[in-house]
Image (cartoon, rainbow, N blue to C red):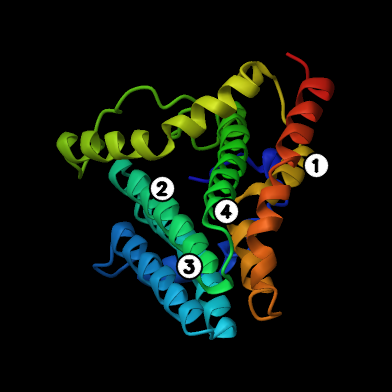
Amino acid sequence: MSKLAAQDKFLDLSDYGRPIGTFIANQLKNTRFTPIHVTLVFGVCGLIAIYFILQNQYLLAAIFIVLKSIIDAADGELARIKKTPSYTGRYLDSVFDIILNFLFLMTICYVSKTNIWFAFLAFIGIQLQGTLYNYYYVILRNLSVGGDKTSKIFEDESPRALPGETQKSVDILFQIYTIFYGAFDKIIHTLDKDAYKVKTLPNWFMTLVSIYGLGFQLLIIAIMLPLNLIEYIIPLFIIYTSLIFVLIGIRKTVFRV
């Protein structure tokens, strides 16, 4: 099942890895590889990228960052192809993402000798950016007729386990997810608490919001590293966070409840 109905699909600037990710998933559909195995592989790619940053091998780091984004798209596609969706995989994917985001920024901070408090601020900014994108995206998915509705707008309780996974594993990962993401979700929901009441979020708006998707964030890092702009990455993401208020302002002004 597609995440969105055909009429609701938009140009997602953060989802450039989807075509190759889909190809990878199709190659794995008749194998013993599961979506969780693929999630573990993208985690390894992220760690390899961090190693290359530490070694000042920025081009190789950029390649593995982009590869991480591509494989990140493959796990969800494999779950859809095999018709084996799971909350375990979904939460594990999110937990890996936030840990890798933190490690990326701390590594960049270390190598570029940036103030660590700026790195923490950039990390908070990146997570708020991604949370805004996910918030609007899940709202659209729930509005989309014929789209995938497995994601909830408000993650306020552990979901019931799907076939093939245990309730205990879902509950544990949900608690971990809440610890990592709960505060960011609450901040974004407070800033735009009525967004879920809208009747539509048009394609052009979602394309604009997709500049805050994780894939696009990582692409920025992957471009800046081999250009030897590593010392500007953290300041850029701090400034980049200010666009949150612009995007929320557009939503409240143009798409009123």
Tag on residue 204? Answer: 1
Mark 1 is on which residue type? Answer: Trp
The mark closer to the camera, 3 or 4, is: 3
Q: Secondary structure at mark 2?
A: helix
Pointer 2: what residue? 94
Q: Position of residue 179 (x, y in %)?
A: 34, 35
The mark closer to the camera, 3 or 2, is: 3
Labels 3 and 2 touching (C-beta < 8 A): no
Q: Tell me which corner region of the image, top left, top right, bottom left or bottom right, holds residue 156.
A: top left
Mark 2 is on which residue type? Answer: Ser
Mark 4 is on which residue type? Answer: Leu
Q: CA distance from mark 3 to mark 4?
A: 18 Å
Residue 192, compared with residue 81, is above or below; it is: above
The mark closer to the camera, 4 or 1, is: 4
For label 1, count other residues whose C-alpha is less than 10 Å away and answer few (under 14), some (14-19) or many (20+): few
User: Which of these two is toward me, 32 or 215?
Assistant: 215
User: Which of these two is toward me, 255 or 79?
Assistant: 255
The mark closer to the camera, 1 or 3, is: 3
Pointer 4: what residue? 214
Q: Position of residue 157 (x, y in %)?
A: 33, 23
Tag on residue 107? Answer: 3
Q: Can residue 21 be seen?
A: no
Q: Position of residue 88 (x, y in %)?
A: 28, 44
- Earlier sequence position, callout 3 versus callout 4: 3
Labels 2 and 1 touching (C-beta < 8 A): no
- Earlier sequence position, callout 1 versus callout 3: 3
The residue under the point 59% across, 20% down is 190
Mark 3 is on which residue type? Answer: Thr
